[in-house]
Image (cartoon, rainbow, N blue to C red):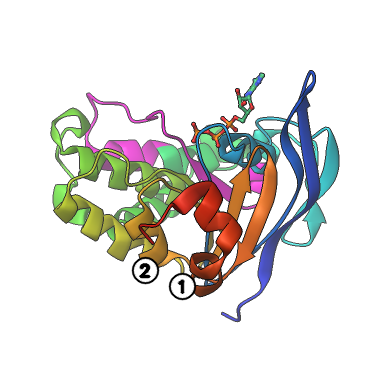
Amino acid sequence: MADEVLLSAKNLVKRFGGLAAVNGVSVDLWRGRIHAVIGPNGAGKSTLTNLLSGDLPPTTGTIHLGGAETTGRSPEKISRAGLGRSYQKTNIFLPFTVWENVRLASQSRAQRAASWLSSATSHSVTNERAEKAMVLAGLEHRREAIAGTISHGEQRQLEIAMTLATEPQVLLLDEPLAGMGTVEAERMVALLQRLKQAHAIMLVEHDMDAVFALADRLTVMVNGQVIASGTPEQIRADAGVRAAYLGEEH
Ligand SMILES: Nc1ncnc2c1ncn2[C@@H]1O[C@H](COP(=O)(O)OP(=O)(O)OP(=O)(O)O)[C@@H](O)[C@H]1O
């Protein structure tokens, strides 16, 4: 699959009353690349994610997904157009098994008609999609485990498997490494590296070691605005970024 821009946002603005939480932000997400968005608390990262996913409509600006404009469309429509989002807040059904959770997520993608037709074909398509997502997320050996009993890191993998079961082209990942220990974080970094081959990924993450290990491009936001955008090397060398955000540690 050739690298291509799968999502393109231009001059996004989101105002809450007098506050411009996102103020003129443009971003292109490419298949085969991880694009990290970093910035201090309140910089506007979650708001930007909400604009791209349709959870919030932008005040002004445009969003194209896979060539079609999705500005102002519902999250459901944007999801169907190929965008998958994992939330910080978990969507997992804890009493269900890993497989049942991924299967349910896959079912949510099934055509409405298929549920009443209930054909063997639609079931096998749903199962195949779930199986593929579970394997891709590295959870096949935990298939029968109750979701509430698996480790925190595995639950984050499960959230990603559930997102993958909707077959997105673009993945918006909100702090996938939050609360992880070293071994779990390393496993998640390896998973994201695998996923980027077939997807465009936007990563919002506070773990700077992981961000600099993973990102092909970075956008640095402060107070709703982009203060720098570029490769990890360019961002590391940017005096404004060092002053505003990274300090002297990078
Ligand atoms: N629904 C809302 N109504 C009013 N103000 C909001 C709303 N959502 C966010 N804000 C404000 O917009 C600004 C950006 O917030 P946002 O959550 O996008 O930042 P962030 O970079 O994701 O921060 P964090 O790293 O802490 O998650 C903040 O000043 C926040 O208080």
Which quarter of the figure is the C terminus placed in?
bottom left
Magenta-colored stretch includes residue 221: no
Relative horizontal placement of residue 99, taking residue 19 as reference (left or right): left
Relative horizontal placement of residue 187, taking residue 20 as reference (left or right): left
Q: Residue at x 78, y 46 (%)?
A: 70
Residue 228, position as x, y percentages in the image: 64, 59
Of 218 and 122, which appears nearest the observer? 218
Magenta stretch? 78-104
Which quarter of the figure is the N terminus placed in?
bottom right
Q: Disc 1 on helix, strand or loop?
A: loop
Task: Check if mark 2's residue and mark 1's residue have beta carbons within 8 Å.
Answer: yes
The CA span between labels 2 and 1 is 6 Å
Q: Residues within 10 Å of mark 2 (few under 14, many from 20)?
A: some
Magenta-colored stretch includes residue 94: yes
Residue 115, position as x, y percentages in the image: 52, 35
Residue 21, position as x, y percentages in the image: 69, 32
Q: Residues within 10 Å of mark 1 (few under 14, many from 20)?
A: some
Q: Which residue is mark 2?
A: 194
Q: Residue at x 57, y 62 (%)?
A: 239
- Name the residue type under label 1: Gln
Seen from this angle, which residue lies furthest bottom?
A: 2
Visible residue check, residue 136: no
Of 131 and 176, which appears nearest the observer? 176
Q: Disc 2 on helix, strand or loop?
A: helix
Seen from this angle, which residue lies furthest top?
A: 17
| Ligand 1 quarter of the rendering | top right
Visible residue check, residue 3: yes
Q: Which residue is mark 1?
A: 197
- Name the residue type under label 2: Arg
